[in-house]
Image (tube, rainbow, N blue to C red):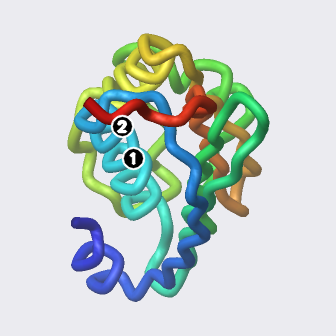
Amino acid sequence: MMTSQFRQKSIAVERVGCSALVRADPDRLRQILVNLLTNATKFTPAGGRVRIGCSTGDDAVTVEVLDTGIGIAPESLQRIFEPFVQVDRSLTSVDRDGVGLGLAISRDLARAMNGDLTAESVLGEGSRFVLTLPRVTETPVER
């Protein structure tokens, strides 16, 4: 779904998967991931990199999206999950599309599925978004 956007900007994509089952609504999970990958594409300059990784713990599955984009200033990082907040786009040529709801909605969706969405970033180096969701630990019963 995002391949053409990555190709258009010559962004290298690395995928590291895992085989654990996650307890989540598939449509909401897709919505969160598309938002994170769209943001990574918007804020990563041509020739940059995006890494999509997955790891498992005893009770949770963690999906992380890392980019080599413009990063987020520390004072903005504390607010990016608030509705209508956008990072300072003066550091990039990205048009001011959107209203700053994607991350707020994504975090709300993650929390509604008993998970969370967090972020770390270094201005000028890139960002790391971490989605944590409950892992399916019991074997599904066939009906």
- The residue drawn where x is 58% and y is 19% is 79
Location of residue 44 with respect to 13 vertically, above or below: above
Q: Residues within 10 Å of mark 2 (few under 14, many from 20)?
A: some
Picture coordinates of residue 40, whole percent (x, y): 46, 58
Q: How many marks?
A: 2
Picture coordinates of residue 100, whole percent (x, y): 34, 27
Secondary element at tag 2: helix
- The residue drawn where x is 57% and y is 65% is 17
How far is disc 2 from disc 1 in space, using C-alphas?
Answer: 6 Å
**Which image quarter: residue 68?**
bottom right
**Which image quarter: residue 98?**
top left
- Residue type (three-letter) at the residue carrying disc 2: Leu
Q: Quick check: can you spot residue 142?
A: yes
Location of residue 24 with respect to 64 vertically, above or below: above
Location of residue 21 with respect to 100 vertically, above or below: below
In the rendering, which numbered label is found on residue 133? none
Most foreground residue, 87 or 129: 129
Q: Which residue lies under the disc numbered 2?
A: 29
Q: Give yes or no for contact between labels 2 and 1 (Cβ–Cβ under 8 Å).
A: yes
Left or right for 44, reference 7: right
Picture coordinates of residue 60, whole percent (x, y): 67, 33
- The residue drawn where x is 62% and y is 55% is 54
In the rendering, which numbered label is found on residue 33? 1
The mark closer to the camera, 2 or 1, is 2
